[in-house]
Image (cartoon, rainbow, N blue to C red):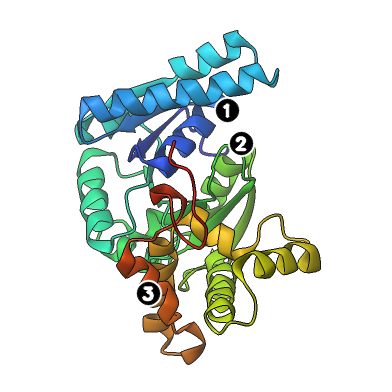
Amino acid sequence: MSMNAKSIGVVGTGVMGSGIAQVIAQSGIEVLWLSRDAGRAKAAVERIAQSLGRVVAKAKMTEAERDAAIGRLHTTTSFDDLARVDLVIESVPEDLAAKIDVFRRVEAAVGASVILASNSSSLSITKIGASTKRPERVVGMHFMNPAPLMKLVEVVRGLATSDDVIKDVSDVARALGKTIVVAKDRPGFVVNRVLIPMINEAVFTFMEGVAGAEEIDTAMKLGCNQPMGPLELADLIGLDVCLSIMERLHAASGESKYRPCPLMRDYVDAGWLGRKVGRGFYVYEKK
């Protein structure tokens, strides 16, 4: 890594924040993990310990390696503690105001040379950067879910992001074992710009009665060699998340091809959000 990152800050202890923290710790780099409260942070570390325990059980990691990785996770509830890191990766929910608030608080705590990265999947890196005093050092680092397993990181260049920052975060992502794709700051970047409209079209196909949910998923798995069908993938992502991204694509472009399917909105209104609630296009047993 050209920036020689010895310690990386992660803000957020949700699914993506936890996955990113795990990846960094497994890669031999110290993690300073910021959470809203100590209890939430402790629970997040316990989830990672369980996740790594499953890796050990599959003989893909030794117990000593697991213990070392867990030992690299350091939690805090204070933004001021981020002063000692080389890079900060924000991973809070997809809300622009919330992300801008985090960036302003991080910026106040860290040195001028520190890079500020967002794990946003669709929000404008340019807007986030413009809210800071260092837009040239703000960049997107969009990890895929689940971060420990998925190899891709989209490195997103805001309008003001410097070439040096793109190189540095690309080097960091590669050091974490990831493959990078550099994308311009456009709604959805690459993955979600292609993926979410495909899911939306699958929902239209289902709504119009062209085929049932299982038939649509089977057709796409066997006809296009996809590991998951679009409707079961929507359930995994969360229909509320899919709808939100479609709405952003539609609002930003004004193009009718990004109009969210009314049935997707109906499901979200009904609370049928997918796996996380036990019902979406399929019904799931609650654990």
Other-residue count near label 1 (Cα within 10 Å), few / some / many at <14 / 14–19 / ≥20: some
Q: Are marks 1 and 2 in contact (CB under 8 Å)?
A: yes
Measured as percent of width and height from the top left, residue 80 is found at: 20, 32
Comparing marks 1 and 2, which lies closer to the viewer? 1
Quadrant of residue 246 within the rendered picture = bottom left
Q: Is residue 150 above or below residue 126?
A: above
Look at mark 1 in the image and give the residue it sits on.
Answer: 27
Quadrant of residue 208 within the rendered picture = bottom right
Q: Is residue 110 above or below residue 245?
A: above
Q: Amino acid at mark 2?
A: Ala
Q: Amino acid at mark 1?
A: Ser
As helix, strand or loop, the secondary structure at mark 2 comes to helix
Give the number of callouts.
3
Look at mark 2 in the image and give the residue it sits on.
Answer: 175
- What is the CA distance from the residue labelled 3 to the residue labelled 2? 40 Å
As helix, strand or loop, the secondary structure at mark 3 comes to helix
Residue 223 appearing in the image: yes
The dot on residue 265 is 3
Which residue is located at x 45 percent, y 73 percent?
Answer: 187
Comparing marks 3 and 1, which lies closer to the viewer? 3
Q: Is residue 21 above or below residue 50?
A: below
Other-residue count near label 2 (Cα within 10 Å), few / some / many at <14 / 14–19 / ≥20: some
Q: Earlier in the sequence, mark 3 or mark 2?
A: 2
Q: Is residue 162 above or below residue 194?
A: above
Q: Quadrant of the N terminus?
A: top right
Nearer to me, 29 or 145: 145
Q: Amino acid at mark 3?
A: Arg
